[in-house]
Image (tube, helix red, strand yellow):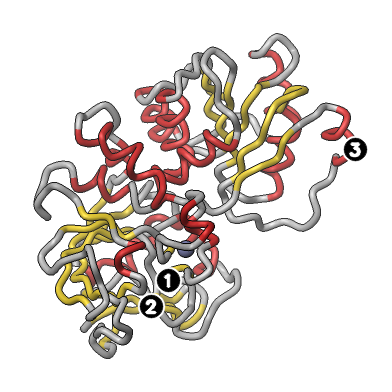
Amino acid sequence: MRATVMPKAHEVRVENVPDAVIQNPTDAVIRIARACICGSDLWPYNGGPNVEDQRMGHEAIGVVEDVGGEVQTIRRGQVVIMPFAYSDGSCMFCEEGLQTSCVHGGFFGNGGEPGGAQAEALRIPQADGTLYALPVGEDDALMPSLLTLSDVMGTGHHAAVTAQVTPGKPVAVVGDGAVGICGVIAAKRLNAEQIIIMGRHPDRIALAKEFGATDVVSERGKEAIERVRDLTGGFGVHSVLECVGAEQAMTTAMGIVRPGGAIGRVGVPHYGPIDLSTTLFYHNVTIAGGPAPVRAYIDELLPDVMEGLIDPGRVFDRTVDLDGVPDGYRAMNEREALKVMIRP
Ligand SMILES: [Zn+2]
């Protein structure tokens, strides 16, 4: 079968690799119907920690082709969402809805043994706990939005939840990438009234406004912090969704959160210690967030997608086949595409 491999930074190849097969009785094998490229895939692409010949891709919808002997609920032929982390669905953390900390869990497309979803097929460990069977066929018109439940929409929602978005209280979203835009959707969905999007790409800002952003701040650094304060009566926002992971984004987040507020960070942090801890202490600021337990959020978000109340699939502005994946990385890296969908 064919799969996407990143041998080193700035190099993406689609190669022939051994077929995905059942290895453990709790495994399933899915044929990938849709996958996509994540902003976090661009970190290794740009020289972040690389694993030699790393298999890429951690977001997918697939069709179950095979199941191991101990798989109870997942069946051949089902159309399933594959969250970016696999989990057994039964340990203490899974029961608490924190599947990303599952004691038998791990992450796809991260250089580990499970491989990646930007491929023709993938072995899924802990199939019963990991996969979420959908009530639709693989060519359903809702596929783009359903695909976002494997990561980007669940991650935007996690940013909103951990930033304690509360009806009527002001929100700022740092970053206008696909996660930031899903953060706007999530904040609106949780009935925030004022939603400030912080970014500078006109087409992304336009999409964020359609999804409910009320104010735009395109400045950076100190000017950005001042603008947000101006927009919020001088005190900053109650909730900050930090959807980038870069140091400047976190510095901005800490500069615009008001006393008693919260920062929900979902961008993988690419910075060292967090400064301003004394200031944040005296302001009673909560810093929360981490990898989103998207498996837990599907129950909550799926009905809204099925009823058309939210349409996060609009973050995809380009579709490629497997041969087009290397150019998809280039296009996302050059900000020519917001988010690239893959139909193997
Ligand atoms: Zn678990």
At which x and y percent is residue 88? Answer: 41, 66
Q: Amino acid at mark 1?
A: Gly
Q: Earlier in the sequence, mark 2 or mark 3?
A: 2
Question: Left or right: 12 with respect to 119?
Answer: right
The residue closer to the viewer here, 233 or 169, is 169
Q: Earlier in the sequence, mark 2 or mark 1?
A: 1
Label 1: how many residues lie within 10 Å, few (<14), some (14-19) or many (20+)?
many
| Quadrant of the image occupied by residue 113 | bottom left
- Is label 1 in a helix, a strand or a loop? loop
Question: Left or right: 201 with respect to 253?
Answer: left
Q: Quadrant of the N terminus?
A: bottom left
Labelled pair 2, 1 in contact (Cβ < 8 Å)? yes
At which x and y percent is residue 198? Answer: 56, 31
Please name the residue shown 55% across and 61% down the image.
Answer: 101
**Mark linked to residue 115:** 2
- Is label 3 in a helix, a strand or a loop? helix
At which x and y percent is residue 314? Answer: 28, 38
Q: Is any part of residue 320 visible from this angle?
A: no
Q: Is any part of residue 69 visible from this angle?
A: yes
Distance from Cα at disc 3 to Cα at disc 1: 37 Å
Residue where numbered disc 1 is placed? 109
